[in-house]
Structure formats: structure tokens, C-alpha cells
Image (tube, grey):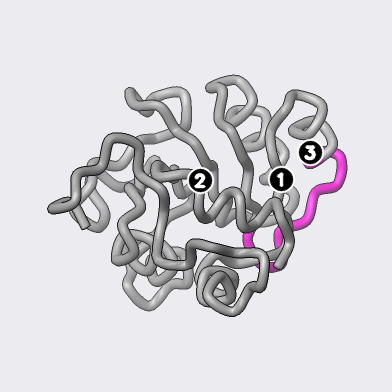
Amino acid sequence: MDETIERILTGTHTWAVVGLSENPARASHRVASFLQARGYRVIPVNPNASEILGEPAYPDLASVPDRVEVVDIFRRSEAAGRHVDEAIAIGARAVWMQLGVIDEAAAERARAAGLEVVMDRCPAIEYPRLRRSPSSSVGTGPIRRGARPQDG
């Protein structure tokens, strides 16, 4: 498994999902639900929704009041760069561009700003590989700072 992917999946907790759909049949909804079920906090970013998956939705990354670690982009490649720039502006740790989302120039800007970058990958596909990865000592979910045993 790619070390960047492993670091992001095991060392982060709060993901903003840009383009998260209210429609359960859409990939963005399924992936965000997958992440939630594994203990990640998912913050929906969708200007046309007020709440998705039980979380308040925000029109853009700048409107999110909480610290975002990973910006997961479910938008077309031509729109990804704007969201990568927003991720840089809010101080995210990483940008994850979903399957089919490729913007090399935006990825380079993010790396130059110190963000980790994953492109053309899906966390719902990569997450199960953690358990099979010889380098991984985790594989059971995100590392949550300050988690108590009962938080599971």
C-alpha cells in the first residue's frame, strides 16, 4: 500500500467531502457513509443541501467552522483545482481526489503547500487494503486523538 494513503487513512479523523450528494445511490454518499461507519467524522460540502448523513452541510470549505484534516473531492477534474486551493487556504493536511478526478497542476500546488495528495483513488477501496498491507500495524480504523476506550 502507498505510504501516503496509509498515513491519511490511519492518521486522520475529520474529512470534508466536497460534492457529497444527498442521494444514497450516488458514489459520494456511499463513500462518505463508508467512512462514517469506520469512525471518521464526515463534513458534507454541498451548497444545495442543509444536512447530509446527519451532519450539517456547508456551501464551501471556507464555511466549515471546524478543523478539516482531509478534503475528499467528488467533483469533475476541471473543478478540482478550485477545491484544492480552498483546502490549502483552510490549512487541511491532505487532499484526496476520487476515482477519475485528476488535476496534476492542483496536486503540485497542494504538495508545494505541504499537503499530502492522493489522486484518482477511492478511500472505500483503499481502506480494506490496510489489513492486507505488510507495512500497516493498524487497519482497524482512524487514529483518533483523545479517544477513550469506550469510544471504540
Q: In the image, what residue occupies the spot 47% across and 72% down? A: 27
* Prevailing secondary structure class for the magenta stretch in the rendered image: loop
Residue 136, image quadrant: bottom right
On the image, the x and y values in percent for residue 3 come to 71, 55
Foreground tag (2 vs 3): 2
Q: Mark 1 points at which residue?
A: 117
Residue 108 appears left or right of 137: right
* Helix, strand or loop for disc 2: helix
Q: Nearer the viewer, residue 105 or 10?
A: 10
On the image, the x and y values in percent for residue 150 come to 13, 53
Residue 119 appears left or right of 92: right
Residues in magenta, as a range: 98-107
Q: In the image, what residue occupies the spot 63% across and 43% down? A: 95
> Image quadrant for the N terminus?
bottom right
Q: In the image, what residue occupies the spot 30% across and 47% down? A: 49
Identity, as a three-letter code, of the amino acid under mark 1: Val
Q: Mark 2 points at which residue?
A: 11
Q: In the image, what residue occupies the spot 86% across and 47% down? A: 104
Q: Name the residue under label 3.
A: 106
